[in-house]
Image (spheres, rainbow, N blue to C red):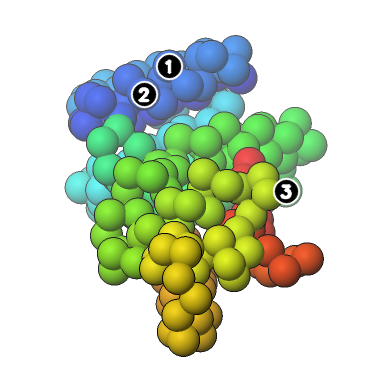
Amino acid sequence: MKVLIFDRKIETLAFLCEHLENHGIITVAAENGSKFMCNYLDKRLDAIIAAKQELTHYGLNSIELLKKISKDITVCTYAHSAYHHIKNINIISSSHTPKNIKANEKILEIILSKCKKRADLNKDYIYSLPKKSGILLKHLIINKKNGLSDADIRIIFWGDEKLSRQNSIYNHVYNLKKSLKKSFNNRYTILKTNKRYRLIRLKKEA
C-alpha cells in the first residue's frame, strides 16, 4: 500500500510516517501544500491521510478531495491531539470501491487508531481527581488482579479502626465510577464481584 500524508506539524507527520512504515506501508510525506499538490493525483496512491486543518486551508474536506481524484482511493482525516498524537479520525473511500480498497480502509482504521493518545491512569488522570478518589484509583490499579474489599478500602482511608463512616466507602466508589465514565467514555468502570472491587476495561482497544 502507498499512502500520501499531509501535515505541516512535523512531529505528527514523522510519527505517522514511522508508524505506517513499521506496518510495511510505503509513505510519501508532504510537509507543505506544494508537495501535497504535486503528489495527491499520483495514480499509484492507495490512500491519502491529511490533517483536517490542512484540507480546510485549501477549502477542502474528505468528500471534496475524493471528487477531485478520478480513481478508487481512501481518504483519512484527523485532528491534532496532545504531542504528536491524533484524534477524531474519519475514513471514507470512493463509492463502489473494490474489495482491496475496503481492505485498505480497514487496515488504516486499525493502524491509525493506535496513533491516538491513550489515557494513562497513573499520569494523566489520577492526580486530577479529588484526593480520596485518587487514592482509591491508585490502589485499584496496584491491586488490579485481586481487587479490594470493603475492609481494604476502609483501612486505606481510616486505618485499622472500625469507624462508623464505613458507608462513605460507597460514596468514594460511586464518585470514582462517575468520573471514569465521564473522562474515559465508558472504557473503564469499577465492578464488584465476590465482595471485591476491581477496575475493569469495558471496550477492547484496537
Tell me if label 2 and label 3 are in contact, CB under 8 Å.
Answer: no
In the figure, 76 relative to 95: above or below?
above
Which amino acid lies under the numbered mark 1 shown in the image of this protein? Glu
Give the numbered dot on residue 15: 2
Earlier-in-chain disc, 1 versus 3: 1
Residue 92: percent from the left, percent from the top?
Answer: 57, 49
**Which residue is the site of mark 3?**
96
Question: How crowded is the residue under tag 1: few (<14 C-alpha within 10 Å), some, or many (20+)?
Answer: some
Mark 2 to mark 3: distance in Å? 32 Å
**Which residue is the site of mark 1?**
18
Which amino acid lies under the numbered mark 2 shown in the image of this protein? Phe
Which amino acid lies under the numbered mark 3 shown in the image of this protein? His
Picture quadrant of residue 192: bottom right
The quarter of the rendered structure image containing the N terminus is top right
The residue depicted at 55 percent of the width and 61 percent of the height is: 152
13 left or right of 90 in image = left
In the figure, 15 relative to 182: above or below?
above
> Between residues 175 and 160, which one lies in front from this camera angle?
160
Q: In the structure shown, which secondary structural element does the residue marked by tag 3 occupy?
A: loop
Question: How crowded is the residue under tag 3: few (<14 C-alpha within 10 Å), some, or many (20+)?
Answer: few
> Between residues 171 and 41, which one lies in front from this camera angle?
171
Tell me if label 1 and label 3 are in contact, CB under 8 Å.
Answer: no
> Between residues 186 and 9, which one lies in front from this camera angle?
186
